[in-house]
Amino acid sequence: MRECHKTSIGIIVGTGTKQFLQQMKPAPSEELTINTRYGEVRLICLRWQRENTKDIVDVFILPRHGYRHEVPPHMINYKANIAALKRVCVDGIIATAAVGALHDNLKIGDILIPDQLIDWTRQRPLTFFEHDSSALVHVDMTQPYCERLRKLLLTASVKAKVKAVDGGCYVCTDGPRYETAAEVKALKLLGGDVVGMTVATEATLAREACTCYTALCVVTNYAAGVGGAHPSHSEVAEVMKQASNNLSLLISTAVDLYVVEDCICKHSLDEYGIEPPV
């Protein structure tokens, strides 16, 4: 385990990794390979100098789909990713995600900071505690995304002058296919606002790892059937490319404002008296 001696923040980047990295301000960096019990993970560590205090912050960037965008959402090693960020002592994780809008009140290019989720996945690991030797654990997910980090991002959006929608329900599906029009109708009836394939799984595992986690969702398309929409990956990639500047500006502002604080997320296993199995 890495020695925890300075502020460290994890950034999980989805579609648009290349553009995001290009937009981040220059900083000394190194590539790390972290071995976990769930697999090997490659991270980029930026030595970030805050604009306000000149302190150095370690920013660990994890490309969710790989450096060449070669890993589909249902094949991502979510456990290893969260475990790796925990092992390098990140205090919190901010994740980017491309999403489809379930309602036409959201516009293409909007950035949404969700506060709820519905997990519709069926074929991926849902917990670190799944073996016979594991403790019987039920973590509280009343607020699935860390409110401390959500408030940080909302503050950063005002300071950076990047508009962000406060709150919304993220629905997570397995992928890699897009949803049918009938499924989208059902998700709307369930209370969903946007649909994607990643940041519910990550949120659950981060909570089990006693790590703060929140998401920045970019509306890249309308979900199937909304206004006659037919989603395409080229459309998603192009919108994420256009949004990369606002995303990097918002996240870099959040890093500059970040303060290590206690949080209920860090105490999700207290009643069990155990450490996260990472």
Image: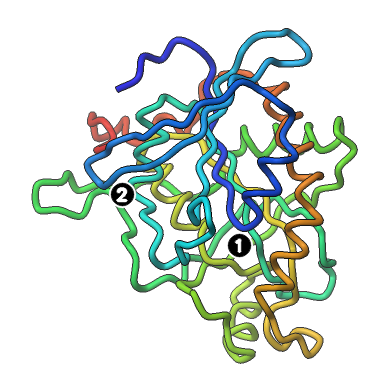
Instruction: Tell me the quarter of the image containing the N terminus.
Output: top left
Residue drawn at point x = 42 percent, y = 42 percent:
207
Q: Which label sits on residue 170?
A: 1
Question: 71 or 194, which is in the foreground?
Answer: 71
Where 93 falls versus 255 (above or below)? below
The residue to which callout 2 is attached is 138
Q: Is residue 222 left or right of residue 72?
A: right
Q: Position of residue 175 (x, y in %)?
A: 49, 74
Say whether residue 72 is left or right of residue 151.
left
Quadrant where the image shows the C terminus:
top left
Which label was assigned to residue 124? none
| Dot 2 crowding, Cα within 10 Å, few <14, some 14–19, many 20+ | few
Above or below, 65 relative to 101: above
Name which quarter of the figure residue 171 lies in. Answer: bottom right
What type is the residue that disc 2 sits on? His
Does dot 1 land on a helix, a strand or a loop? Answer: strand
Does 112 sit above or below residue 220? Answer: above
Q: Residue at x 41, y 15 (%)?
A: 4
